[in-house]
Image (tube, helix red, strand yellow):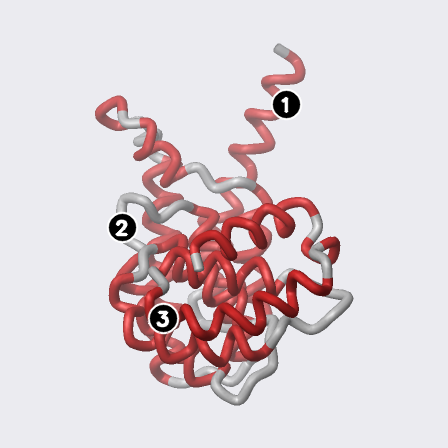
Amino acid sequence: LREMAVLCNAFAKFNADLMPRDLVEAIAAAAPLRMVQGDPHSISLLCNALSKRTLDAPPPSVFRAATPQISRTLSSFGPTDLALIASAFNHVTIPEKSALLDLASLEIPRVISAPECTPEHLSSFCNSMARHTNGKISKKNLEVFDALAAEIVRRLKLSENNEIGVGGSQSFSQRLLFPPESLALIANAFARQGLPQGPSLLEAMRKALISWASDRRGGVTG
């Protein structure tokens, strides 16, 4: 399964639609038989790569076979694999999709405080949650959005207070530096839902964008 995932991901990084049809058909036939032995990263990488195909629908057999294995092992998924799975399943149409995304969303509060969770992960989670709920927010969904908003605001405030790089840690800095495209995804996700966290979150983001724009002007003039 790992080799299939790496091969498909290589195509997806360039253009998933260039994946030969016979290759996709071979993977659709072989991958389900190997899912039980698959590790979280191989499964998430394979599903994400196949979900990026736009000219043909992703092979449903792969996603349906992956669902039980993902459901059993979600508690071991880190931020990267969880983000890949949430994004991938938002792009397919299978009966198991909604239930799996509900389970995946419950794991988001667990991983967002992990050292390896980046701003890009946070924005991906926000975008996936918005796509999954599509404005229909349950109490559990709201708790996930609450956790995301609190973590994003916390990091933005640390960044605003010039705490980037505390202890000389580059990884700490990377957890606080939100690229504008990540902020845009977050703002769009919360705006689409009309969530109560929106105003405070947008205010924290506004300050970050002003700071980013100021740094850009300084770089140009300097």
Would residue 12 be found to the left or right of residue 169 on screen? right
Residue at the image point whose x is 66% and y is 13% from the top? 221
Q: Is residue 60 above or below residue 166?
A: below
Would residue 162 be found to the left or right of residue 194 on screen? left
What mark, if any, has residue 217 been given in the picture? 1
What mark, if any, has residue 114 been given in the picture? 2
Which of marks 2 and 1 precedes in the sequence? 2
- Where is residue 118 drawn, in percent x and y? 40, 45
Q: Nearer the viewer, residue 54 or 110?
A: 54
Identified by mark 1, the residue type is Arg
Residue at the image point whose x is 64% and y is 49% from the top? 11
SS under mark 1:
helix
Instruction: Give me the C-alpha separation between circle 1 and circle 2.
Output: 33 Å
What mark, if any, has residue 98 been given in the picture? none
Q: Nearer the viewer, residue 101 or 9?
A: 9
Residue found farthest to the top: 222
Identified by mark 2, the residue type is Ala
Identified by mark 3, the residue type is Val
Q: Which residue is mark 3?
A: 144
Q: Is residue 163 above or below residue 83?
A: above
